[in-house]
Amino acid sequence: MIIGLTGNIGSGKSTVSRRLAQLGAEVIDTDLVARDVVAPGTPGLERIVREFGPEVLNGNGELDRARMASIVFGDPAARARLEAIVHPEVNRVVSRRIANYREGGGSAPVLVVEVPLLIESGMHRMMDEIWVVTVDPGVQVERVMARSGLSREEVLMRIKAQMPQEEKCGYADRVIDNSGPVEETIRQVDAIWTELTGYKPS
């Protein structure tokens, strides 16, 4: 089974994917894939520099992600230009890995693809099930501020730039509420895992 795991910033997707990996799932983190496809020397980074200029690079010739974020989160047109470069590259890598898994290239009972923009990128069409991790909006803002050092206004801007989580839930086969203690989130994940695989986590 191929599961697309998504949720907005601060929702707790990584908490869920880590638990699924502990239970025996193979996990593809598309944030890591996105870093790889814009690494120095890649066509992806070359296109970004042509589109946005060399000022988006740091002193090591790598993409300055903070600088890039400051450009695109306040400018929907710039964000669309960046996504038009990065999303096809990520989709290509993920499509190849899904094909390999379907052809017997993995022993895990479940392949989880963690994608922040699963719906927006159209990648949800590749999945057998879509799981959305949700969070109380107040908890979401506090979590992102605590981990990122961003101001409340910056966090709210980033949340506003994403598809509302209520809209994402309309695509979901499963919804995991991560508003409370992590133990409650784990309990939800374990219950779904048991339903899918027949194995009850110890």
Image (spheres, grey):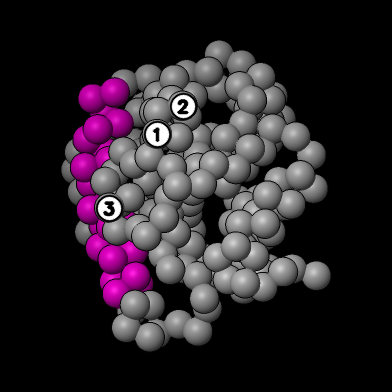
Label 2, label 3: how far apart the Cα atoms are: 19 Å
Which residue occupies 44% across, 59% down?
3
User: Residue 105 at x, y = what percent?
Assistant: 39, 85
Magenta span: 76-99
The residue singled out by tag 1 in the image is 170
If the image is split into quadrants, where does the C terminus sit?
A: bottom right
Which amino acid type is shown beneath numbered disc 1? Gly
- Position of residue 96 in the picture relative to residue 196 (left or right): left
In the displayed structure image, the side of residue 14 where residue 1 appears, left or right: left
Q: Which mark is residue 125?
A: 3
Q: Is residue 44 left or right of residue 153?
A: left
Q: Residues within 10 Å of mark 2 (few under 14, many from 20)?
A: few
Placement of 82 over or under 96, stated as above or below: above
**Amino acid at dot 2:** Glu
For the residues labelled 1 and 2, say whether their Cβ atoms are less than 8 Å apart.
yes
Residue 107 image point, x, y percent:
50, 84
Of residues 36 and 113, which is closer to you in this image?
113
Can I make out residue 41 in this image? no
Q: Secondary structure at mark 2?
A: helix
Query: Callout 3: few (<14), some (14-19), or many (20+) C-alpha neighbours within 10 Å?
Result: few
Residue topped by disc 2 = 166
Residue 75 appearing in the image: yes
Q: Main secondary structure of the magenta part?
A: helix
Tell me the number on the disc at residue 104: none
Label 1: state its secondary structure: loop
- Disc 3 marks a residue whose amino acid type is Arg
Identify which residue is drawn at 40% across, 34% down: 170
